[in-house]
Image (cartoon, grey):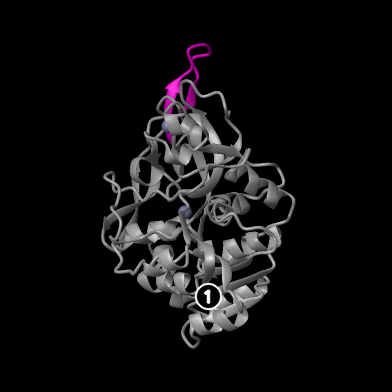
């Protein structure tokens, strides 16, 4: 929101002296990242969105580029109709609230879940609101984090405690995804856990797994900088997929039975086959990656090993607590710290460069942030 000063001379109606008149006018435009096609995102000045009932306008402070944003950037996932690139891993300050909003007020520091839910459908009523029948994703419908202001559904918002920074606030969303994917597998502290993939979600799974205190945690990494980060975060075993055979290594490390739980954060044929091969009989595979197409896979081992396959969709309740509230608490207690994953920070003006860096892991990027603090 830019304040435009219109300066002119006018006569004062009391003393008749000529005075300088300053008119302040809201221009109601903002800078935003706009998709112009595949791998083409540019910063433009667009009309500010009007605040709708049930929504709030948030002054965006920090916004992370997610793997799903990269899928949209590459055209693997549908880009929004509005062409506004709508990041959902964000934090900011509420500056305007729409009709019917009482859960947050102007001045609150917040971070959103990536979707709006209705609160009244069958799934919402039993707390499974990530499965809401009327779910609306910010990335498709809204004005999200890659803009000066984000228009967000109030149902999606969580307040940030004072001791959480805006950067930590923008990491709540991917941490909640990771947290849920581990809890969905139902593992206990005796579990040996294998995490496939050392991107943001995989590495945050590792950070959460350390807090949940599993017996042993193994992670696979494609790039050396990811492997180094995994070691820094305390992985018991790091398998470098470019030079090591995942199945053979995992078999030796987790002998005699294999991993109790495997979390697949990559979502391609290779990782599905690896998961089925390294999980123990009657073990659980938690699928949390974003699939971009059908897979050619064999399910025979799922039957013969009596495996459980569970999907993990975003976040909602795990037990009596929302995944978001649980993660905010873990960060506030300093039990989990995702900030070492932030490898790059760009101002919003450099949204084009930020996406280039985030889309090419050879840049050494893990989490790329757009900062407007
Ligand atoms: Zn995300
Ligand atoms: Zn619902």
| Residue 226 in the image, given as x and y percentages of width and height | 54, 75
Question: Which quadrant would residue 117 be assigned to in this image?
Answer: top left
For the question of whether residue 92 can be seen, the reply is yes
For the question of whether residue 344 can be seen, the reply is no
Q: Which residues are magenta?
A: 5-24
Magenta stretch encompasses residue 84: no
What kind of secondary structure does the magenta stretch mostly adopt? strand
Question: Which quadrant would residue 215 be assigned to in this image?
Answer: bottom right
Looking at the image, residue 34 sits to the left or right of residue 284; the answer is left
| Residue 91 in the image, given as x and y percentages of width and height | 55, 46
Q: Say which residue label 1 marks.
A: 220
* Residue lying at the far front of the rendered structure: 304
| Residue 183 in the image, given as x and y percentages of width and height | 59, 53
| Residue 125 in the image, given as x and y percentages of width and height | 49, 29
Magenta stretch encompasses residue 19: yes
The residue drawn where x is 49% and y is 80% is 247
Q: Residues within 10 Å of mark 1 (few under 14, many from 20)?
A: many
Q: Of residues 271 and 98, which is closer to you in this image?
A: 271
The residue drawn where x is 63% and y is 49% is 327
Against 267, residue 362 (above or below) is: below
Q: Of residues 272 and 97, which is closer to you in this image?
A: 272
The residue drawn where x is 30% and y is 47% is 80
Query: For the residue labelled by badge 1, is the local secondary structure a helix, a strand or a loop?
Result: strand
Looking at the image, residue 51 sits to the left or right of residue 60; the answer is left
């Amino acid at each position: 929101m830019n304040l435009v000063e219109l300066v002119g001379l006018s006569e004062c109606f009391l003393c008749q002296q000529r005075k300088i008149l300053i008119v302040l006018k809201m221009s109601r435009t903002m800078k935003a990242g706009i998709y112009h096609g595949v791998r083409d995102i540019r910063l433009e000045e667009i009309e500010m969105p009007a605040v709708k009932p049930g929504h709030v306008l948030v002054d965006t402070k920090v916004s992370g580029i997610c793997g799903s944003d990269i899928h949209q950037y590459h055209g693997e996932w549908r880009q929004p109709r509005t062409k506004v690139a709508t990041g959902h891993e964000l934090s900011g300050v509420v500056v305007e609230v729409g009709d019917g909003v009482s859960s947050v007020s102007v001045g609150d520091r917040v971070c959103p879940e990536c979707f709006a839910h209705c609160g009244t459908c069958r799934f919402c009523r039993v707390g499974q609101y990530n499965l809401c029948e009327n779910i609306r994703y910010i990335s498709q419908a809204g004005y999200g984090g890659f803009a000066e202001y984000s228009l967000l559904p109030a149902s999606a918002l969580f307040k940030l405690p004072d001791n959480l920074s805006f950067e930590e606030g923008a990491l709540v969303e991917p941490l909640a995804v990771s947290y849920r994917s581990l809890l969905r597998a139902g593992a206990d502290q005796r579990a040996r856990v294998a995490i496939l993939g050392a991107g943001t979600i995989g590495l945050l799974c590792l950070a959460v797994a350390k807090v949940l205190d599993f017996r042993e945690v193994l992670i696979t990494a494609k790039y050396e900088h990811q492997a180094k980060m995994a070691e820094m975060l305390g992985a018991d075993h790091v398998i470098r997929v470019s030079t090591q055979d995942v199945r053979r290594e995992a078999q030796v490390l987790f002998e005699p039975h294999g991993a109790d739980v495997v979390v697949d954060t990559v979502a391609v044929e290779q990782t599905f086959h690896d998961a089925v091969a390294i999980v123990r009989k009657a073990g659980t595979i938690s699928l949390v990656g974003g699939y971009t197409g059908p897979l050619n896979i064999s399910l025979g081992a799922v039957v013969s090993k009596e495996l459980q396959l569970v999907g993990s969709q975003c976040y909602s309740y795990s037990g009596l607590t929302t995944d978001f509230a649980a993660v905010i608490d873990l960060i506030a207690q300093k039990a989990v710290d995702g900030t070492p994953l932030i490898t790059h920070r760009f101002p919003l003006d450099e949204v084009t460069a930020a996406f280039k860096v985030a889309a090419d892991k050879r840049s050494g990027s893990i989490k790329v942030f757009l900062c407007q603090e």
